[in-house]
Image (spheres, rainbow, N blue to C red):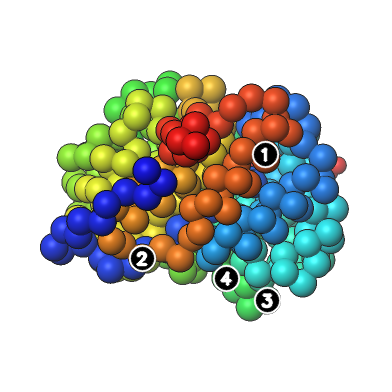
């Protein structure tokens, strides 16, 4: 079978937006450097497969993430089409680089924990806001849309459990800097469905509209789709995913791949939820990329469809 049987479930959203992070979250973690032309083809193929949002790259310090040191070259290759794709920006220096290239969407990325703020941003939990505040203000003044990520929302490899109240406080502060969306990151994939429900309702109780929330699941413990269902039941309509299940975080070694976009597309299709993505084109793209990376995709759906004949 190349498609699941569609059986709808009452009470779930009719349509969701898939926010594709493979070219950024995926490739930032690859041991081998991927040529810029291959990245440009990846981004183009993902857009052509119907993905409505494709995060392209990061304007972080090139020594911190050498895999994405070619951000400017990539954006130049993508031309006008690239200007509407979000890019990660940690600080004013990153913003300057993105603005020079005409980028119209950026994403800042904060940490819910002290240790990860140090490891990922060379900052403290409080210090990160001083870095993001002028970055977001200047971006907004320039007419640039800002997404905010908050990481380590379900657990942290150094600190263990992270209280829901702490995640909500940090997430709220990041969002209130002037973001249009808050992406709740399970950076190391330890979240479970009940925890997702509790965290989403805590954000809603704190005044964040459900339409402003996105979920960003890594699939380390195989919980990402169960967690997606819990978030759908709470009314969330934006989900981050990575083509072929690429991914991880170079500053959180226990993070493995993101929820694979193909697995998410199969799951949503089965529930009759609209997503606008062409699964065959997406699987072909992930199989092509796996050829470049020299190893098979970890996505269950890519593997199943590739052998389904
Ligand atoms: P720092 O070393 O503290 O930076 O790094 P600094 O402000 O002290 O500056 C030092 C030098 O770096 C200066 O140059 C700056 O100009 C330069 P000098 O004056 O010495 O010649 N510099 C830059 N150069 C280029 N681009 C920049 C930049 N900033 C400073 N943007 C910094 C602080 C935040 C820059 C660093 O820690 C960094 O780049 N971190 C990024 C780490 C990263 O990308 N992690 C992965 C993404 S997060 C993630 O994957 C999680 C997510 O997927 C959600 C989830 O799963 O939870 C989003
Ligand atoms: Mg991530």
Mark 3, residues whose alpha carbon is within 10 Å: few (<14), some, or many (≥20)?
Answer: few
The residue beneath circle 4 is 145
Report the front residue among 59 and 38.
38
Please say whether residue 117 is visible from this viewpoint. Answer: no
The residue beneath circle 1 is 289
Whether the residues at callouts 4 and 2 have beta carbons within 8 Å, the answer is no
Image coordinates of residue 147 in percent, x first then y, are 51, 61
Using residue 25 as the reference point, say whether residue 142 is left or right of it: right
Report the front residue among 134 and 88.
88
Mark 4 or 2: the one toward you: 2
Whether the residues at callouts 4 and 3 have beta carbons within 8 Å, the answer is no
Residue drawn at 43 percent across, 21 percent down:
158
The residue beneath circle 2 is 274
Specify the label residue 127 is tagged with. none
Image coordinates of residue 258 in percent, x first then y, are 48, 38
Report the front residue among 244 and 256.
244
Calculate the distance from the C-alpha at mark 4 to the C-alpha at mark 1: 30 Å
Q: Ligand 1: give its quadrant.
A: top right
Image coordinates of residue 53 in percent, x first then y, are 55, 62
Dividing the picture into quarters, in which one does residue 13 lie? bottom left
Ranked by sequence position, the earlier of labels 1 and 2 is: 2
The residue beneath circle 3 is 142
Q: Please identify the quadrant where the N terminus is shown.
A: top left
Ranked by sequence position, the earlier of labels 4 and 2 is: 4
Calculate the distance from the C-alpha at mark 4 to the C-alpha at mark 3: 9 Å
Mark 4 or 3: the one toward you: 4
Ranked by sequence position, the earlier of labels 3 and 2 is: 3
């Amino acid at each position: 079978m190349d498609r699941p049987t569609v059986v709808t479930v009452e009470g779930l959203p009719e349509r969701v937006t898939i926010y594709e992070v493979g070219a950024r979250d995926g490739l930032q973690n690859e041991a081998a450097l991927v040529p810029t032309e291959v990245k440009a083809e990846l981004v183009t193929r993902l857009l052509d497969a119907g993905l409505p949002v494709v995060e392209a790259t990061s304007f972080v310090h090139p020594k911190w993430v050498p895999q994405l040191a070619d951000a400017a070259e990539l954006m130049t290759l993508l031309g006008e089409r690239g200007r509407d794709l979000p890019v990660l920006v940690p600080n004013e220096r990153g913003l300057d680089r993105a603005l020079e290239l005409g980028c119209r969407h950026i994403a800042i990325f904060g940490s819910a924990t002290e240790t990860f703020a140090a490891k990922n941003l060379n900052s403290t939990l409080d210090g990160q806001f001083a870095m993001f505040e002028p970055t977001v203000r200047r971006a907004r003044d320039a007419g640039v849309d800002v997404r905010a990520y908050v990481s380590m929302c379900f657990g942290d490899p150094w600190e263990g459990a992270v209280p829901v109240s702490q995640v909500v406080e940090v997430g709220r502060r990041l969002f209130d800097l002037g973001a249009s969306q808050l992406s709740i990151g399970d950076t190391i994939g330890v979240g479970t469905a009940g925890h997702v429900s509790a965290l989403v309702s805590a954000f809603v109780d704190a005044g964040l509209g459900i339409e402003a929330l996105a979920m960003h699941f890594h699939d380390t413990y195989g919980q990402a789709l169960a967690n997606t269902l819990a978030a759908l039941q709470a009314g969330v309509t934006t989900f981050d995913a990575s083509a072929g299940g690429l991914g991880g975080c170079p500053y959180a070694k226990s993070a493995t791949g993101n929820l694979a976009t193909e697995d998410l597309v199969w799951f949503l299709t089965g529930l009759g939820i609209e997503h606008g993505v062409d699964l065959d084109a997406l699987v072909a793209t992930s199989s092509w990329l796996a050829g470049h990376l020299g190893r098979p995709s970890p996505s269950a759906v890519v593997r199943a469809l590739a052998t389904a004949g």
